[in-house]
Image (cartoon, rainbow, N blue to C red):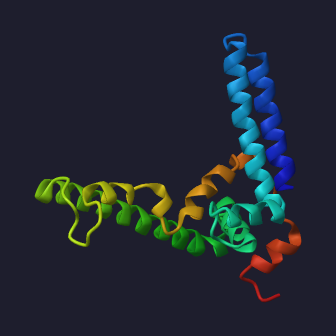
């Protein structure tokens, strides 16, 4: 159902791009390339092989099941049973952002104190520290990529009854 919803959204977006008289052919092609990137991203959610390729290349760290569970939590965060897991995922991203902020501040302080000399541990000093601020050093990088998988609330497929029952607080 998720795949169908995404394909429907991307198809409507492509039709909008193609029919827009204000875009040149180059602009249309560029925007359609962006849609194709979205299709590829969706494929890595639906097809475990594509997800595993991303893990092998280092672009993903979470397992296929864990990544899809995190997507489910984000998509259905308003379900009572998913509100705490959603908060936890957001707190993990907050921690990552705070670490990146600390790294940036540390690099600025080192630059102010020793300039571009060698670092105390024999590293390249401030130049090395600046590289650690990039997103490749995020601990929970996969969680930040989940926003690429989100759907508008109106396009969100309803949860199947079997899953709703499993997520319910009732003991029946």
- The percent position of residue 120, horizontal first and vertical second, equals 20, 70
Residue 129 is left or right of residue 1, and the answer is left
| Quarter placement of the C terminus | bottom right
Could you say which quadrant of the image residue 27 lies in?
top right
Could you say which quadrant of the image residue 143 lies in?
bottom right
Residue located 25% across and 60% down the image: 125
Front residue of 8 and 66: 66
Residue 15 is left or right of residue 149, and the answer is right
Front residue of 68 and 152: 68
- The percent position of residue 2, horizontal first and vertical second, equals 82, 55
Residue located 38% across and 60% down the image: 132
Residue 122 is left or right of residue 163, and the answer is left
Residue located 69% across and 12% down the image: 24
Residue 144 is left or right of residue 118, and the answer is right
- The percent position of residue 50, horizontal first and vertical second, equals 79, 59
- The percent position of residue 9, horizontal first and vertical second, equals 78, 39
Residue located 37% across and 61% down the image: 100
Could you say which quadrant of the image residue 118 lies in?
bottom left
Q: Is residue 118 visible?
A: yes
Residue 101 higher or lower than 38, as above or below: below
């Amino acid at each position: 159902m998720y795949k169908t919803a995404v394909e429907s959204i991307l198809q409507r977006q492509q039709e909008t791009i193609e029919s827009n008289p204000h875009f040149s052919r180059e602009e249309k092609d560029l925007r359609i390339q962006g849609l194709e990137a979205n299709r590829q991203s969706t494929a890595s959610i639906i097809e475990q092989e594509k997800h595993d390729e991303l893990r092998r290349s280092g672009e993903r760290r979470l397992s296929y099941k864990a990544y899809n569970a995190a997507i489910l939590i984000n998509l259905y965060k308003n379900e009572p049973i998913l509100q705490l897991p959603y908060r936890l995922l957001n707190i993990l991203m907050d921690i990552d952002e705070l670490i990146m902020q600390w790294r940036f501040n540390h690099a600025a302080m080192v630059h102010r104190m020793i300039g571009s000399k060698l670092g105390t541990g024999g590293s390249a000093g401030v130049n090395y520290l600046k590289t650690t601020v990039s997103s490749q050093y995020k601990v929970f990088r996969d969680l930040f990529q989940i926003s690429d998988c989100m759907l508008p609330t109106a396009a969100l497929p309803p949860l199947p009854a079997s899953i709703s029952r499993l997520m319910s607080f009732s003991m029946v």
